[in-house]
Image: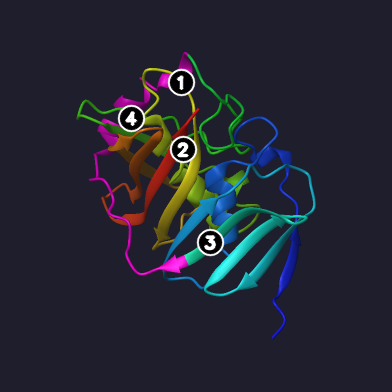
Amino acid sequence: MKTPIHEVRVPERFRGPEGTANGGWISGLVASYLPAGRAVEVTLRAPTPLETVLRIECAPPRVRLLHGSELLVEAGTVDDDPLPPPFVSPEQAAAAERNFPGMDVHPFPGCFVCGDRKPGEGLRIHPGPTGEPGMFAALWHVHHGLAEWSQTLPLCHVWGALDCPTGWTHLIGGGAALLGRLTAHVRRPVRPGATYVVVARNEGTERRKRFASGAVYELGGRLVGASSATWIAV
């Protein structure tokens, strides 16, 4: 059977580091080509260029994103769900984001998820320390402009929300890191106009690797999605 192939182009709007796609966003895009209802593990092999014709090859349970012959991203379903960090109250999250480290020094200030973007042009998730060791949180006000006339947010945006906050748990002292692997399971839709609590927790280090877990919760504490991330310090 011939492998289904789709052409995609990542708009500049969805950048992370300058000139390349946000790691969580592109992970979610690739994951969206797999059946819903399962956890998906995504490995980023190389930076994904913006405004460039790319190729997605679907052969479930695996999906690959390529630029010419270069493998950029590959994804597949996994059996084990990522374990979310615990819920924090909306009041705690609002207080935490006032101390977002990126207000002073941000390695990627134009990032679609955690950068200084106008409402509707980015997710504007700015996590800060909660006071519990290794725990970060923020409120996420989902702007209607992010859904582009849909009643729910695209999966790639939700994966972005499960990505960047995990990186910030390792960057409070400065520096930079790039996403290497992201495993996520989105259980419920995210709706424009609603507000959510985003939580991330530092899960340790191993040489240049930085591990963290993330979650998006409804304000009442119901889990929307969870993630586990591996970052590479640069």
Residue 96 among magenta residues: yes
Eye-nearest disc, 1 or 4: 1
Eye-nearest disc, 2 or 1: 1
**Which of the marked residues, 2 or 4, is nearer the chain's N terminus?**
4
Crowd rating for badge 3 (residues with CA inside 10 Å; few <14, some 14–19, many 20+): many
Which residue shows up at 35% across the image and 31% down it?
A: 169
Where is residue 88 shown, x and y percent of the image?
Answer: 24, 40
**Which of the marked residues, 2 or 1, is nearer the chain's N terminus?**
2
Disc 2 marks which amino acid? Answer: Cys
Q: Name the secondary structure under disc 2.
A: helix
- Real-space Cα separation, disc 1 to disc 3, in angstroms: 28 Å
**Which of the marked residues, 2 or 3, is nearer the chain's N terminus?**
3
- Real-space Cα separation, disc 1 to disc 4, in angstroms: 25 Å
Where is residue 37 shown, x and y percent of the image?
Answer: 42, 71
Horizontal arrangement in the rendering, residue 29 relative to residue 114 (left or right) = right
Quadrant placement of the N terminus: bottom right
Disc 4 marks which amino acid? Answer: Ala
Q: Mark 1 points at which residue?
A: 175
The image's mark for residue 164 is 2
Which residue shows up at 52% across the image and 46% down it?
A: 24
- Real-space Cα separation, disc 2 to disc 3, in angstroms: 19 Å
Residue range of the region highlighted in magenta in the rendering: 77-104
Q: Mark 3 points at which residue?
A: 75
The image's mark for residue 94 is 4
Q: Check the image and report above or below for 116 versus 120.
A: above
Q: Name the secondary structure under disc 3.
A: strand
Q: Check the image and report above or below for 132 versus 68.
A: above
The image's mark for residue 16 is none
Horizontal arrangement in the rendering, residue 132 relative to residue 58 (left or right) = left
